[in-house]
Image (spheres, rainbow, N blue to C red):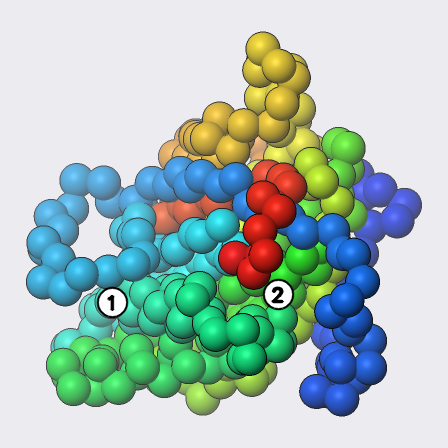
Amino acid sequence: MSLGAASPLASDVQVGRPVGRGIFDFFKEADFTRTRASFRFDHAVAGFAKHPNRPVAPDTEIFLSERYGEDACFRRHDSLGVADGVGGITQLQGGDSSMISRKIMHYACMELERYDNIEDEAFGAYYMVDPVSILTRGYDRAAHDMKQQGIEGATTACLAVLRDDELRIANLGDSGVLVLRRGDFVFRTEAQQRSFNVPYQLGYPTRDQPTDAQHFTVKLERGDIVILATDGMFDNLFDEDIIDEVTKCIRANTRGAANPVDISHALACRARDVSEDSRYATSPFQSRAVAEGFYYQGGGKLDDITVIVAVVSDLEDTPDRR
């Protein structure tokens, strides 16, 4: 994911860079007795399959994740995730990238649910949650299932976990995270790619691992808008397009509030419109293709699209913060 060189950025925008913290650093920095801002997500998702008329087999398992074509996602009050299954593998015998993206998101959500009713004596584990560890455990369980079922597949993956006022991010590939505050980006991830249009990915035939994911920590404020999306949005919308849609949704709201349902739908629809219309003069994907020396005519890039929008709000003042 790359949002395009023409995009206007706030002067204080944080472009993603890895952040490493050890266990002793955490306890040295953390003070569980001090008052900390505690937030939650009000969230919604919107998405479209690249081939909406293609028959989809009914689920034979119960999933905590949702899917849009070969994209998958999950969302909770304290965590979000998106994954983009690699379509080319579907052509191979036993290939089904929609399954690995769906399973990784399912198991990641399941791993996070383990902390919902944690005992008081183990409460430190709740605060210590590391999205790279969650991604690793989710991937290991998904890979085991895939092997047992004789299915091959590969996917990008992006997780964001909220603890008090801290957003912890693990991103592998070209899905990504944006944080908007008062109309400007204050943080965004950058794509991990081996080469043009070849992102890092988990599964067959790559050797990339969850530990290869970028790891970031971002301080949030009340009212921040967090967007997780697959490259179906980022390849078709420039920075200014995203800000434009968010601004229009807030202005149209009778209370002047950021409604995640409205914003996610608006972003997904605009990305779909660009992806399906070759008359668009340019798109982020087209701009990057030309910069890499490729001839690309046709405006946007047709792809599955998944957009999660979460608005940061106050957490109810409960003893266990869950």
In the picture as drawn, the residue positioned furthest to the top comes out as 254
**Can you tell which quarter of the image residue 160 is in?**
bottom right
Q: Amino acid at mark 1?
A: Met
Q: Position of residue 312 (x, y in %)?
A: 63, 42
Q: Residue under label 1, please give it.
A: 99
Q: Nearer the viewer, mark 1 or mark 2?
A: 2
**Who is closer to the viewer here, 246 or 5?**
246
**Residue 9, numbered circle:** none
SS assignment at label 2: strand
23 vs 107, left or right, is right
As drawn, is 132 to the left or to the right of 292?
Answer: left
Q: Residue at x 54, y 73 (%)?
A: 120
- Residue at (80% x, 62% y) in the render: 34
Residue position for label 2: 169
Mark 1, Cα crowd under 10 Å, few <14 / some 14-19 / many 20+, is many
Quadrant containing the N terminus in the rendered view: bottom right
Residue 116 found in image quarter: bottom left
- Which residue is at 29% across, 52% downward? 67
Rendered view: 316 above or below 61: above
Q: Is residue 55 left or right of residue 289?
A: left
The answer to whether mark 1 and mark 2 are in CB contact below 8 A is no
Please tell me which residue lies in front, 241 or 81: 81
Q: Is residue 111 visible?
A: yes
Among the two numbered marks 1 and 2 on one chain, the one whose residue lies closer to the N terminus: 1
> Is residue 248 at all visible to an observer of this figure?
no
* Residue type beneath disc 2: Ile
How many neighbours does mark 2 have within 10 angstroms: few (below 14), some (14-19), or many (20 or more)?
many
79 above or below 200?
A: above
